[in-house]
Amino acid sequence: MRAEEAAQLVHEIEHLRRRTRASLHHVSFPCVMFGALMLASAAIVATAGGPSVGLFWMVAGPLGGVATGRHYRRRERRMGLEGPAWPGVAVGLGIMAGCFLTGGLGGALGLETLAAVGPLLVVSAGGLGFALLHRSVPAAVVAVALATFVVGLWAVGVGPRQLGPLGTALYGATLLGVGLACRAPQRG
């Protein structure tokens, strides 16, 4: 085999590796699912407040996680490829626990800012975790941008009563938009 042929073969193998990884880690379904749930959550935060949103997520979070797991499992079987599930499950459970801890603790202690901002920052940290798992720079940028925006709103004096619903709606709309954009047919 000549050097040119070997270089071409290495290039083709690398291309197939990237395509396979992208197929296994396609993010449209969880983004659409959790974006829609966050938009519903924003309405609950705005109208009913903390305890109601906690109850909503106690039901919606695990159901969304199970639906996402089933989606990926069906996708993997259809493709004939499998990846380990536990890293994604661990990040998802970490997000749920962190959100309940910061939101619940903030509410119980009367720390409205922690109750409003804490879960959003936990979701951003989880987004960074998923970005690392999927080796996705765009996902990391979105997670950091959302966290920066929420902290910026807080820094300029937006109060927790407005920040909770506004931030949750922003996160939900962003996730939904990213998920729908990822579903669009790829050109090239």
Image: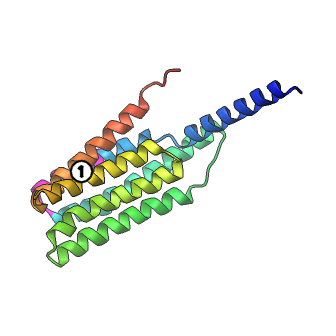
The magenta region covers 36-49
Q: Which residue is mark 1?
A: 149
Residue 172 shown left or right of residue 125 in the figure: left
- Specify the quadrant of the image occupied by residue 29: top left
Closer to the camera, 57 or 114?
A: 114
Residue 22 shown left or right of residue 36 in the figure: right
Residue 171 can be seen in this image? yes
Residue 45 can be seen in this image? no
User: Which x, y percent locates residue 158?
Assistant: 11, 57
- Specify the quadrant of the image occupied by residue 180: top left
Residue at image position (84%, 28%) is 3
User: Which x, y percent locates residue 42?
Assistant: 19, 51
Count of numbered marks:
1
User: Which x, y percent locates residue 23?
Assistant: 56, 37
Q: Is residue 99 magenta?
A: no
Residue 186 shown left or right of residue 31 in the figure: right
Mostly what secondary structure, the magenta segment?
helix
Residue placed furthest toward the top: 188
Residue at image position (24%, 75%) is 105
Image quarter hosting the N terminus: top right
Residue 140 shown left or right of residue 164 in the figure: right
Mark 1: amino acid: Phe
